[in-house]
Amino acid sequence: MNKQVVKPNYTLRGIDDILHRDDEIRTYYEYLKDIFSGVSPSNIFIYGKPGLGKTLITKLVFEEIKREAEVRGIELCIININCDELRTEHSILQRLVREIPSDEPRRVIGNSTSKHSEHLKYLINHYSGIIIIILDELDKAVNPEMINKIIRTESEASGQFPTIVGITNDLGLRDRFPPHLKSVLCENGLIINPYNADQLADILRARAEIAFKKDSLDEMVIPLCAAYAAQDYGDVRRAIDLLRVAGEIAESRSGKQLIEQDVRDAYNKLEIDRVIEVIKTLPTQSKAALLACIYVYDSPKENTMSNIYTVYSGLCDAMEIDVLTQRRITDLLAELNQLGIIEGINEFKGRYGRKKVITKITSKEHALEILFQDYRISTIKNIPASAFLRF
Ligand SMILES: Nc1ncnc2c1ncn2[C@@H]1O[C@H](COP(=O)(O)OP(=O)(O)O)[C@@H](O)[C@H]1O
Ligand SMILES: [Mg+2]
């Protein structure tokens, strides 16, 4: 009926449509309530894995806050920046300079970062309201240290400092901040936890009601999408993708009803797409290591680290590229394991001699196809795998 609501960029109509985040939203308001006393709230740091609603909650909470501030006649400037789009300090400053209200006509401020920084200071000094700067995907910013400067810019007009709301998928980012930044930026923390399968199913059901005609979903479809997504860590984006792709599959076989098998097919399709994307961006050495894994895995040889390494060395010689040490290759395999491209025992830690290391290679056929698209690896495309296994 309406495909838009199962697309990744669909935004809910309002805060009441957000399910199972009542506690988080309450805490968020609590952190921001100073605004209504005309005071800049403390900085906020929000973190949690991707697809858990961080961006969504932030957008809708601030919509409410903005509306309420207008009603109460409180001067408030909210700037929402996605650091994946504006990565450099310069582009972030440019944006801030553009968005902070000013009575004066816009000036030409040249191109240098320091000029922008100076002008930002000037604007903050002359703005008497509360400034909130949301930095989403903060881990993508080239230089998070620049926040420090902004946080410490006290406004002469209001006697207040801008509030920063930092958001990240990277659970380790906070601990990588220098201590002074960590203490000011992370004054108020908000952890966004994964959804469980039941919560995911509720969220999906709400979407499905708008997206699909009545009775077009088999009753197992939503629980299965939810179960798949919960298996990872409860990513809503993934759950919604599954439902949409399953719907597309049902549509293409001109089925009147979406059935369980469509969800399974959708899962495989998304998994293949993901593996292809990841493999494409790997450096050649990792690709060579992966190719060695596949060759050994498909052969009668035992898939031990030393056999994989022997094949890997042979591949490198044939491609005329450097041969890395076995230790490095072990690290690269551990990375591939992390990325879900291969699965292995012991997570590739420590030393092993003759033990089997690989238990599964995800979407092997597709992986092979992508590997041979690499310029270096394409040079050995016509050499049969068996040539590397004669030892
Ligand atoms: N509680 C929820 N209710 C409804 N939809 C949700 C909920 N949480 C997340 N979503 C949806 O999941 C997707 C990912 O959310 P997003 O806020 O982008 O995640 P994050 O920023 O944490 O990566 C969006 O399409 C969003 O609308
Ligand atoms: Mg986000």
Image (cartoon, helix red, strand yellow):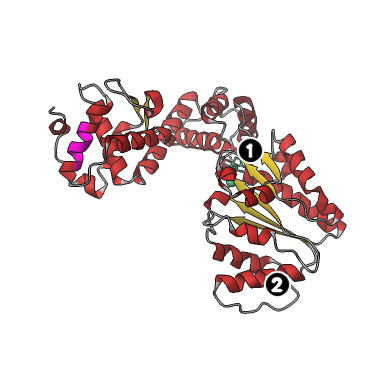
| Disc 1 crowd, CA 10 A, few/some/many (<14, 14-19, 20+) | some
Amino acid type assigned to the residue bearing label 1 in the image: Ile
- List the single residue furthest toward the front: 179
Which of the two discs, 2 and 1, sits closer to the camera?
Answer: 2
Cα gap from disc 2 to disc 1, whole angstroms: 48 Å
Q: Residue 381: in sight, yes or no?
A: no
For the N terminus, give its image quadrant: top right
Residue 186 image offset from top left, x and y in percent: 67, 46
**Is residue 336 magenta-colored?**
no
Determine whether, in the image, residue 100 is placed left or right of residue 323.
right
Name the residue that disc number 1 marks.
210
Which SS type dominates the magenta stretch?
helix
Name the residue that disc number 2 marks.
122
**Is residue 315 magenta-colored?**
yes
Residue at left offset 17%, top offset 47% = 320
Q: Which residues are magenta?
A: 310-316
Amino acid type assigned to the residue bearing label 2 in the image: Tyr
Q: Nearer the viewer, residue 145 or 245?
A: 145
Q: Earlier in the sequence, mark 2 or mark 1?
A: 2
Q: Residue 335: in sight, yes or no?
A: yes
Determine whether, in the image, residue 264 is placed left or right of residue 141.
left
Residue 53 image offset from top left, x and y in percent: 63, 41
Determine whether, in the image, residue 1 is placed left or right of residue 73.
left
Asked if disc 2 and disc 1 are in contact, CB closer than 8 Å, the reply is no
